[in-house]
Image: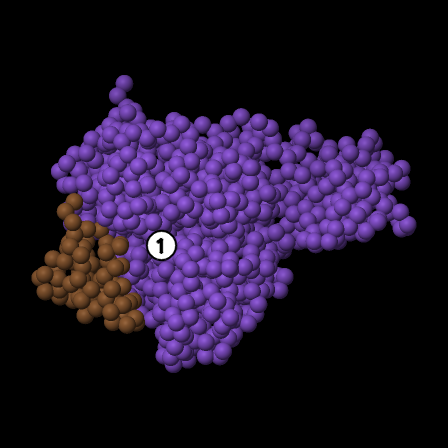
Chain colours: A brown, B purple
Amino acid sequence: MSHSTTDRLVYMANQIATFFASQPHAAAIAGTREHIEKFWDPRMRTKIAEHIAAGGEGLSPIAREALEGLAPVKAA
Amino acid sequence: MSLIHEIDYGTPVSKSEKLVSVVIDGMTIKVPEGTSIMRAAMEAGNQIPKLCATDMLEAFGSCRLCLVEIEGRAGTPASCTTPVMDGMVVKTQTERLKQIRKGVMELYISDHPLDCLTCSANGDCELQDMAGVVGLREVRYGYEGENHIKMGKDESNPYFTYEKSKCIVCNRCVRACEEVQGTFALTISGRGFGSRVSPGMDESFLSSECVSCGACVQACPTATLNEKAMFDIGTPEHSLVTTCAYCGVGCTFKAEMRGDELVRMVPYKDGKANRGHSCVKGRFAYGYATHKDRILKPMIRASIHEPWKEVSYEEAITYAASEFKRIQATYGRRSVGGITSSRCTNEETYLVQKLIRGAFGNNNVDTCARVCHSPTGYGLSQTYGTSAGTQDFDSVEDSDVILVIGANPTDGHPVFGSRMKKRLREGAKLIVVDPRKIDLVRTPHVAADYHLPLRPGTNVAIVTALAHVIVTEGLVNEQFVRERCDWAEFQDWAAFVSDARHSPEAVQKYTGVDPALVRGAARLYATGGNGAIYYGLGVTEHSQGSTTVMAIANLAMATGNVGRRGVGVNPLRGQNNVQGSCDMGSFPHELPGYRHISDAATRASFEALWGVTLDDEPGLRIPNMFDAAVDGTFKGMYVQGEDILQSDPDTKHVSAGLGALECLVVQDLFLNETANYAHVFLPGCSFLEKDGTFTNAERRIQRVRKVMAPKNGYADWEVTMMLAEALGYKMDYAHPSEIMDEIARLTPTFTGVSYTKLDEMGSVQWPCNEKAPEGTPIMHIGGFVRGKGKFILTEYVPTDERTGPRFPLLLTTGRILSQYNVGAQTRRTANVAWHAEDVLEIHPHDAENRGIRDGDFVRLESRAGSTSLRAVISERVSPGVVYTTFHHPVTQANVVTTEFSDWATNCPEYKVTAVQVAPSNGPSAWQEEYEKLSRESRRIAEAAE
């Protein structure tokens, strides 16, 4: 894994999605999304949202689907 | 203040609930059946003379001083070995007894140096006391006969001496080593007159198997085994009860003082975590508090390339505050943050997170639990509803099967390790799941029934395989699961673990463990009676750390091993206040009491009392802070009592992050490795110099008491208050008790906690509130905190850290008995006698393949970096696995560890790094560069005249 923050966030999102992948699909999506919303700082969520907007390269299907529904980050 | 003298009842308490009545010297006393006459008498305030008896040890009956007369019985039986019987009539003082005792004492004294006035134990000697008690006025035998008076002294141990001439062969030290510590390092060598205490096979104490726990010194009734401090300083004159600042066991000690000088730390028998025992760190390794390396004046510098300049507190605090304000004005409110310390008190930790949330106005607060037990918090909160272990330490006394996974209690948590070994010697069964043959696998009078030597990184596979056996072989406690857990979730989980891919046979290709061992261990845990799981960082510090915690929780629920004494899920916390720092809201997503920052009602209660509006977004975790620093969005940091450069993984990335900060404020006892990158240094104070509380691994809140004034002028909580005020956020506390009162007002699990209660009860385990006013020793009795216990599916996902041709070995890291964490404290004590440097354990086969001999300097390299250290060839590690510690900054073992971390919490994967080992001629390039940086960075400018 490179030290690029975006690469790390993609890796982390995929790790989270992999854990929830053993649950039914809807639960896996919701679980992944909720985890990221509860534990990621706004700049991390903003960065991963930008990555999704740029095509979301490297994201697993569950991670991608979860992140596509991520609540927008409020302005600080 | 005076010296606290604990009553010595002579023999241990009887646990019988049946009372019997005995008459001693005309007084009728009721005591539990099985109580010795000696103890019964002492409970009535009648101290029978004794030398070989002490209530920490089983009765021995050798000194013949405690004899009594019993109506209707012939002779004079020893009161320590004779239990009372209903209706027994005892006399402890008769003419016959007086003559016998005096005769016995004459014999002792005839072979004892009469140097009482210059003896280190003068005034603290039971032999001296007994001579007085029995009225010894002469020794008819003289002193010219054969004696031991000219025998030498063993001064090899850095902390205590062994003076053979003063030994009365009472066996107390030998029995303490066996019964309390469980090391069996001491024996009585020789016979009859030649008998003397001997460490090992007549070795010196230092070269023997002695672990220097101090139990023998504490047990010794004379000056035979005595602290060197007693020689140097003299006897103490007052003492205060306080809590050790080392590991998560949280031992209680009497800090025995002469003036403001600490003479010795003596384990406190009423300490509910340690029950009067100690280890080499807590008992002896406190010298760091007065070490010359301590920095006692604040310092600042504009750049890390400049030397430090000593300044006043006012100037340092003003400078730090102005820098944080400048950074926030330039880069935004969320561009700064801080780290609380698991070595500091609850009150200090609470204040640092309050400063960050209240004065910085964001939630960029984290703690070193991020890199150790954050998966415990996550995993147990998901499954049980509480981010903490389920038991008290006493619970182990009722365990029938003990499963130790990823923990090394005899090194990491030695006092609890001794308590566990005691239970194992009594017959409890033991399962060890660990890549290494830790001491518990085979140690005197203890042998694991099963050792599952799994490959590092395969915990989830092995624990799920244990569950597979339990479910498929019909060993589930269905009644418990139906009553206490979500039945539908259990069924999903049972179907999941029953799949053939989770069988021990199927996972052997990952774990390397013989399936028969896994099956045997699972059957034993499920059917052996009370099953208790103890785990440590070998569980949490993996990319699937949280998953393993959940798998462990599943296992305990499926077998009904939750909610009573003797069972449970018990995380052994690393540092003294890891539990407390987590409880106090040190995580960036949680306020004190584990309540998410997004919860408006919780925020409102804090906002009302704190007078600020809180950010409702989670902040950055420690690894995220480094990423953001490298990215340029995180610019300022306040670090209290942690050395993140040495302790956190992937050192090069950490140093890049710290180097990118515009303002790093470090508050510590020493110029630690992190301080090499700091702009402001605020002197910290040791646990001896402040009031507060620590919370240990069993959720026990205990007082830390100030026994001397802060050498740096202020307690850490006072410095945090000054910084907050300079930032424009006033905090107004006159004493840490007021901070605890605020914590109690805001935290539902702490509403019953106060210093008054702690002083009354000694300690209390949270939750402590209106439902449990005296605390909660055991959690989840009758029901889980979250309602129904939640079974969670735990799919094994191999770590991405893989071995290959370039890095064919797996490195796993840990700690050893004599050193603690990054070694900042223990390296500055005589504990270096046992561990002066980090070494690499390597299996003989792997060493031979590489041409490495024992003691050779080797290069340890991973894709993250390399370091050099000496090799120790050892079969404690399996072929393909190497092991080291991270206690010494010269080694910087974390240069080698990687950025991989737990999926849920970002807890680093310290325990699995693919490495190569090769012979080396000297330090790595990183070590040389870092040594130069470190030397330059620690320069302190001469003060202007």
The residue nearer to you, when weighing B12 against B880, is B12
Tag 1 secondary structure:
helix
Asked if residue B831 lies left or right of residue B268, the reply is: left
Rendered residue at 75%/39% (across/down): B44
Q: Looking at the rendering, which quadrant does residue B499 occupy? A: bottom left
The quarter of the rendered structure image containing the C terminus of chain B is top left
Rendered residue at 64%/35% (across/down): B5
- Expressed as whole percent of the image width and height from the top left, the position of residue B7 reads 67, 39
Asked if residue B763 lies left or right of residue B14, the reply is: left
Label 1: how many Cα within 10 Å (few below 14, some 14–19, many 20+): many
Q: Is residue B141 above or below residue A24?
A: above
- Expressed as whole percent of the image width and height from the top left, the position of residue B845 reads 41, 70
Q: Is residue B805 above or below residue B113?
A: below
- Expressed as whole percent of the image width and height from the top left, the position of residue B562 reads 50, 62
Which kind of residue does numbered mark 1 sit on? Ser
Rendered residue at 30%/37% (across/down): B608
The quarter of the rendered structure image containing the N terminus of chain B is top right
- The chain containing the residue under callout 1 comes to B
Q: Inspect this view and state whether residue B821 appears.
A: yes
Q: Inspect this view and state whether residue B928 appears.
A: no
The residue nearer to you, when weighing B348 against B888, is B348
Q: Is residue B832 above or below residue A55?
A: above
- Expressed as whole percent of the image width and height from the top left, the position of residue B64 reads 80, 46
Q: Looking at the rendering, which quadrant does residue B727 occupy? A: top left
Asked if residue B618 lies left or right of residue B550, the reply is: left
Asked if residue B941 lies left or right of residue B527, the reply is: left
**Label 1 sits on residue:** B374
Rendered residue at 14%/58% (across/down): A49
